Image (cartoon, rainbow, N blue to C red):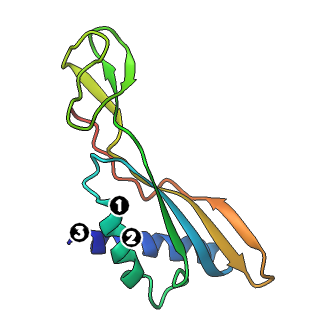
Amino acid sequence: MHELAICQALLSQVEEIAQQNRAVRVTRIDLKIGPLSGVVPVLLQRTFLVARHGTLAEEAVLATEEMPPRVRCQGCGMESVVPTNKLLCPNCGDYHTTLLGGDELILASLELQTEDSSYEPLPASADFVEEHRDV
């Protein structure tokens, strides 16, 4: 189950960001996940419930947003959202496309609680990104 390794890497980065911002708790983690990333959001959610124990994110909510596959046609230049299993240009039908999105796994933002009990929504760094752009 690679979701456990992904959760461990995610929590490691979240803890580092939280410590850099002197947070005492992480209350929310927002991820953007593409269907071509190889990550199943529901499995990641379940794994997160176990992996978060003993971390600053022990009570955090993990929110996921699915990012649709997007391609640019090399023939006509059109950029389009396409079905996961059909990366063809919907304009001209060409199969020579470049994947622009849908394969990402991005830590989009965090909400941190500091000692003064205020919540601080932070945009996350782009360090936790897995992208494969060759189609």
Front position in the image: 78 or 122: 78
Q: Residues within 10 Å of mark 1 (few under 14, many from 20)?
A: some
- How far apart are labels 2 and 3 at the CA level? 13 Å
**What residue is disc 3 on?**
2
Name the spot of residue 122 as percent of width and height, x first: 65, 61
**What residue is disc 2 on?**
45
Q: Secondary structure at mark 2?
A: helix
**What residue is disc 1 on?**
41
Front position in the image: 122 or 90: 90
**Residue 112 in the image: above or below residue 37:** below
Quarter of the image that includes the N terminus:
bottom left
- How far apart are labels 2 and 1 at the CA level? 6 Å
Q: Secondary structure at mark 1?
A: helix
Q: Secondary structure at mark 3?
A: helix
User: In the rendered image, which quarter is residue 40 located in?
Assistant: bottom left
The reply to whether the C-beta atoms of the residues labelled 2 and 1 are less than 8 Å apart is: yes
Which amino acid, by three-letter code, is at mark 1?
Pro
